[in-house]
Image (spheres, helix red, strand yellow):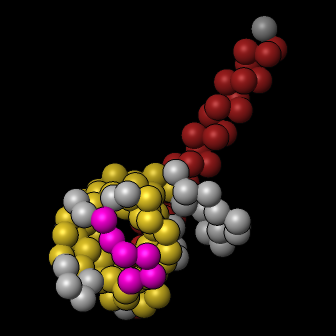
């Protein structure tokens, strides 16, 4: 996995969902690895060029249509895995992404709370 010297603005949540990504000279399929409000990491069927501009359509769970990322930039590449920073999302896509990530955050916090309660119960025995 690539090492980063900066802190992320948003928490990334694990997601496994298919996607289609296209650039100036290619269109390929891939799989979403994680997702945040301003980016994601993906694995796709070809290596993408660092700093290239791409368009991404995410096929998120429980949604009937793909979520369009009109413009993204490849920020790191490691083989067929790469990071995409979202540059331009239509308002409806940003609202859908926000709803999806809100659910992921609630699930994350509930899981963390359950784990803390279990640890307290075990340590109290």
**Magenta region, residue range:** 47-52
Query: Looking at this view, is 9 or 42 the one in front?
Result: 42
Identify the residue at image location x=73%, y=15%. Answer: 122
Instruction: Inspect the magenta stretch and tell me whether residue 76 lies in it.
Output: no
Whether 88 is drawn above or below 11: the answer is below
Inspect this view and state whether residue 61 appears: no
Decide which of 46, 117 is in the foreground and name it.
Answer: 46
Residue appearing at x 26%, y 83% in the figure: 23
Compared with residue 121, is residue 65 higher up or lower down, i.e. above or below?
below
Farthest right residue in view: 124
Residue 48 belongs to magenta span = yes
Residue 3: horizontal and vertical position, in percent?
62, 57
Quadrant for the C terminus, please: top right
**Count of marks, rendered view:** 0
Q: Is residue 104 above or below residue 85?
A: above
Residue at screen point 29% across, 69% down? 58
Residue 76: image location, x then y, percent: 49, 69
Residue 79: quadrant of the picture:
bottom left
- Left or right placement of residue 81 versus residue 11 in this view: left
Left-right relation of 68 to 101: left
* Magenta stretch secondary structure, dominant: loop
Residue drawn 33% across and 83% down? 54
Residue 33 on image: x %, y %: 40, 55
Confirm whether residue 50 shows in the render. yes
């Amino acid at each position: 996995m690539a090492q980063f010297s900066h802190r992320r603005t948003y928490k990334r949540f694990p997601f496994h969902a298919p996607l289609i990504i296209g650039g100036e000279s290619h269109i390929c399929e891939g799989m979403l690895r994680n997702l945040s409000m301003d980016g994601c990491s993906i694995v796709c069927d070809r290596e993408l060029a660092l700093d290239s501009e791409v368009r991404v359509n995410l096929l998120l769970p429980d949604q009937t249509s793909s979520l369009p990322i009109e413009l993204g930039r490849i920020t790191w590449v490691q083989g067929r895995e790469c990071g995409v920073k979202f540059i331009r999302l239509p308002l409806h896509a940003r609202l859908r992404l926000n709803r999806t990530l809100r659910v992921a955050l609630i699930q994350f916090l509930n899981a963390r709370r359950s784990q803390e309660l279990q640890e307290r119960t075990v340590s109290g025995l």
